[in-house]
Image (spheres, helix red, strand yellow):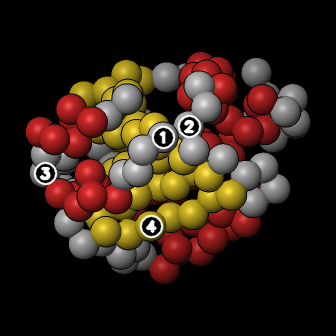
Amino acid sequence: MEIILLVVGSTKEKYIETGLNIYSDRLSKYSKFKIISLIDSRKINDFLKIGDKLILLDETGISLTSINMARQFQKWMNSGPKRLIFAIGDSYGFNKNSYQKADAIMSLGPMTFTHDMARLIFVEQLYRAWTILGNEPYHHD
């Protein structure tokens, strides 16, 4: 299974890009992972294929602890998608069609982050989820 983080626009901060590369490399141990940048959030639906599972990262979504995110992540993977796609919209969020296509909506928490920071926070949490599922020492209860 392939895991994709869809983002709108390029990463602006070099230190964020460095962090994304570090965690992307770490994630390659567990699955095929890539970050794909779209020009416009309206293009998300055009990117989807049959068999994809779409999770929007949006302030209106459910907020999970790291352990509960790992459990939910496992459920999503077990449901058999060809691609598990997480999406971060633009500063206006997502259009109506994306919300309708979404299999789930998840929040990174009640605080507001720049889109660059949200990318890095999510990719770190995705890595953390894998280590939790593998009972690895990265995450401590």
Does dot 1 land on a helix, a strand or a loop? Answer: loop
Look at 22% across and 35% down and name the residue there: 99
Q: What's the CA distance linking mark 3 and mark 2?
A: 28 Å
The residue lying at 52 percent from left, 55 percent from top is: 4
Residue type pointed to by label 4: Ile
Question: Considering the numbered disc 4 on the image, is that residue within a helix, a strand or a loop?
Answer: strand
In the figure, is residue 91 to the left or right of 52? left
- Mark number displayed over residue 36: 4
Q: Are marks 4 and 1 in contact (CB under 8 Å)?
A: no
At label 3, the amino acid type is Tyr
Q: Mark 2 points at which residue?
A: 81
**Contact (CB < 8 A) between labels 4 and 3?**
no
Q: Are marks 1 and 2 in contact (CB under 8 Å)?
A: yes
Q: Which disc, if any, is residue 92? A: 3
- Observer-side mark, 1 or 3, equals 1
In this picture, residue 24 sits left or right of residue 121 = right
